[in-house]
Image (spheres, grey):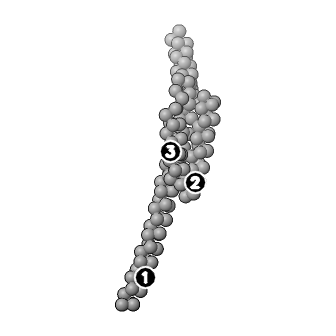
Amino acid sequence: MLSSTSGWLTATVAAAALAGCTSTGVAPPRAEFARAELAIEQAVAADATEYAPLQLQEAREKLQQGRQALYDENFTVAGWLAEEAQVSAELAMAEAQSARAEQLAEENRRSIEVLREELQRKEGTQ
């Protein structure tokens, strides 16, 4: 009798472990999706469409895949994908900000060079 109870217990534990791999009992990852959507909006506002289009596209694709997993009620995978989308969007935003900063620095270097040339011309005419 002990072996049949042991076998039943093992089967129950195995079934519970497999059930844990699905989304049964896992709440929909609403906060993760909200954070991912906000990160994408912020990346777009930071000109990621122009300066980091590939990373922004990856974020959007991950979010869409997450929505599909959400629709399929695979909440665990949906949460992971939403988090990946957020990270991709944050990377896109950081790259866009970096590219924009480099562009502004180059514009400032050009302005300084123009001012130097003007100063040299004025000193040469006096």
Circle 2 packing at 10 Å, graded few (<14), some (14-19), many (20+), is some
Q: Which residue is mark 2?
A: 49
- Amino acid residing under circle 3: Ala
Residue position for label 1: 117
Amino acid of disc 1: Glu
In this view, the residue farthest toward the front is 126
> Regarding mark 2 in the picture, which secondary structure is present there?
helix
Does label 3 or label 1 sit earlier along the sequence?
3
Q: Position of residue 42 (x, y in %)?
A: 50, 47
- The one nearer the camera, 120 or 19, is 120
Can residue 81 be spotted in the picture? yes
Instruction: Measure the alpha-carbon separation of dots 3 and 1.
Output: 43 Å
Dot 2 or dot 3, earlier in sequence: 3
Looking at the image, which residue is at 59% across and 45% down? 60
Precedes in sequence: disc 1 or disc 2: 2
- Taking depth in this image into account, of 94 and 107 the one nearest to the observer is 107
Disc number placed over residue 15 in the picture, else none? none
Query: How many numbered badges does the structure rendering display?
Result: 3
Q: Which residue is mark 3?
A: 39
Instruction: Identify the residue at horizontal 46%, vertical 61% (top origin).
Output: 101
21 or 90: which is nearer to us? Answer: 90
Examine the rendered structure and indicate whether residue 62 appears above or below residue 8: below
Task: Where is residue 102? Give x, y as percent.
Answer: 47, 64
